Amino acid sequence: MTTPFEALREREAKVICKTYGRYPLALDKAQGARLFDLDGKEYVDLLAGLAVVNLGHARADLALVAAEQAQRLVHVSNLFYTEPQVRLAEKLVASCCADKVFFCNSGAEANEAAIKLARRYMRKVRGRDAFKIISLESSFHGRTLGTLGATGQPKFRDGFEPLPAGYVNVPAGDMDAMAKAIDDQCAAVLVEIVQGEGGVNPMTPDYAKGLEKLCRERDALLIVDEIQTGLGRTGKMWAFQHFDMQPDIFTTAKGLANGLPMGAMLATDEVARGFEPGTHATTFGGGPVLAAVACKVLDILEDEQLVRRSAELGARTLARFQGLAAELPEKIVQARGLGLMLAVELAFPAQEVWKQLLELGFVCNVTQERTLRLLPPLVIEEADLIRFAEALRRLLTAN
Ligand SMILES: *Cc1c(COP(=O)(O)O)cnc(C)c1O
C-alpha cells in the first residue's frame, strides 16, 4: 500500500525539477507555530518557512487584508500609482535610516537591485568607474547569476560559470583582508550581520563598526543584506541596529509579507539618485495585495511587540542551549545566535539528530552539515522551545 505521502512523492518526481533535496514530509496545513502533514500529524515549526512566516501561519487578520485588497485591485503594473505601495514604503523608511524603497519579488532580486544601484550611483552620480562588489566567504546573497558572485560559497556556483565579473569574496571577520580588497574600483561592500545559510554566524561589534568606518574612509558604499535577519528576527527591527550602523543600502524580503513573495531594497536619498526612470524595473514588485499585507505585517510587529519578544525569548532560549552545550561539551561545539535566529552546532554531522527530531515532531533545519538552525515564528510559545531543548538533550545523551 502506498501512503498518500508516497503517492505525492512519486508524482512530484515525475514533473518537478530536481533542484531540492526535500524533507520526507508533505504539509497540508498550518496554524500559528504548528504544521500538519497529510496524515494530520502535528509538528512544532521551528523554521517558519526559512524565516518567512514570522507572525505565524494562517492568520485570519492577514488573510482578511489580502482578500479585501484582492477584491479591490490586484495588479496594474508600476506604470501607475497605487496607494498600498506608497503606504508600505512610508512605514519601512520610518523604521530606519533609509529614505527610498524599490519593491521586488524576492531576496535575490532585492540584492540585484542593490548591486545595480551601487554601480550606477558610482558611475553616473559620482563619476567614478567603481563596480566591484566585495562580500564575505560563507555568505549567502541569492542564486541568480548576478548574486551568485556575491554568495561566497563555491558549491552554489559549481557548473554555472562564467558569472558576471566584478565580485570579490574575503574571509569573514578579517578586517585586514577587507581593507586590502577595497580599492578604487570597489563600489560597495555587501554583508549579512548574521550569516544565515552560512551557519548563523553573528558579526562581532568591533568588525561591524570597523567595517562601516573602513567603507566611509575608502568611499565604498555599505550594503547590508537583511533578507533573513530583518523585521525583528534578531531582536531589533533591522540587525544593523544592534551596532548603530547606517548602511547606504539594505535589502529585505523573507518575512515582509509573511509568506507571500515580496522583496525590497532601501537606500538613502543620496544613493537613490543612481536610479532614474527607466533604469530598473519589475512587473510585479510592490503590487497592491502584497503591499497591503506587508503593511499589516508591520502593524502587527508593532502592536504585538514582536521585536522585543524576539530579543527576550531568543536570549532565554540561547541561554538554555548554552546550558546544554556546557552539559554536553563532547556533543555540542557551540550554541549561538541573535534574537530568534539560533543555532546549535554539533560535533558531528547533524543529519541523524535532525531526522530524529523530525520524528518527534520538531521541524528545524541543518546548515553547513553540523549545525541545527532554528528560525521559529516570532509568536512561538516558549513552552515549544523548552520542549525542543529537552528533546535535543534526550537525543544527544542517548546517542
Ligand atoms: C534567503 C536569502 C536570500 C535569497 O532570497 P530569495 O528570496 O531566496 O531569492 C538572500 N540573502 C539572504 C541573507 C537570505 O537569507
Image (tube, grey):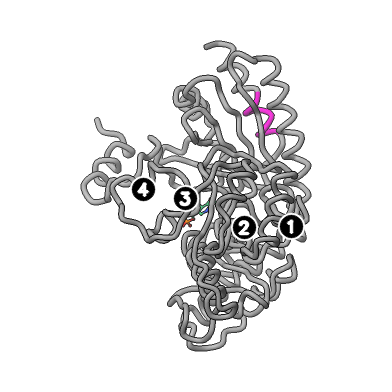
Q: Amino acid at mark 4?
A: Arg
Q: Measure how far apart labels 1 and 4 are at the Cα level.
A: 31 Å
- Image: 352 above or below 308: above
Q: Is mark 4 within 8 Å of ligand 1?
A: no
Question: Which mark identifies residue 224?
Answer: 2
Q: Of the residues under marks 1 and 2, which one precedes in the sequence?
A: 2
Q: Residue drawn at (60%, 16%), measured in percent from left and top?
A: 394
Instruction: Tell me if label 3 and label 4 are in contact, CB under 8 Å.
Output: yes
Q: Is mark 3 within 8 Å of ligand 1?
A: yes
In the rendered image, residue 294, in percent from the top left (x then y), is placed at: 61, 67
Instruction: Tell me if label 1 and label 2 are in contact, CB under 8 Å.
Output: yes
Question: Which mark identifies residue 151?
Answer: 3
Q: Where is mark 1, residue-wise?
A: 245
Q: Main secondary structure of the magenta part?
A: helix
| Residue 289 seen in this snapshot | no
Secondary structure category for the residue under label 2: strand
Q: Of the residues under marks 1 and 4, which one precedes in the sequence?
A: 4
Q: Residue 240 is drawn in which quadrant?
A: bottom right
Secondary structure category for the residue under label 1: loop
Q: Residue furthest bottom?
A: 80
The region drawn magenta spans: 383-389
Q: Is residue 214 left or right of residue 47?
A: right
Q: Residue furthest left?
A: 14
Q: Where is mark 4, residue-wise?
A: 157
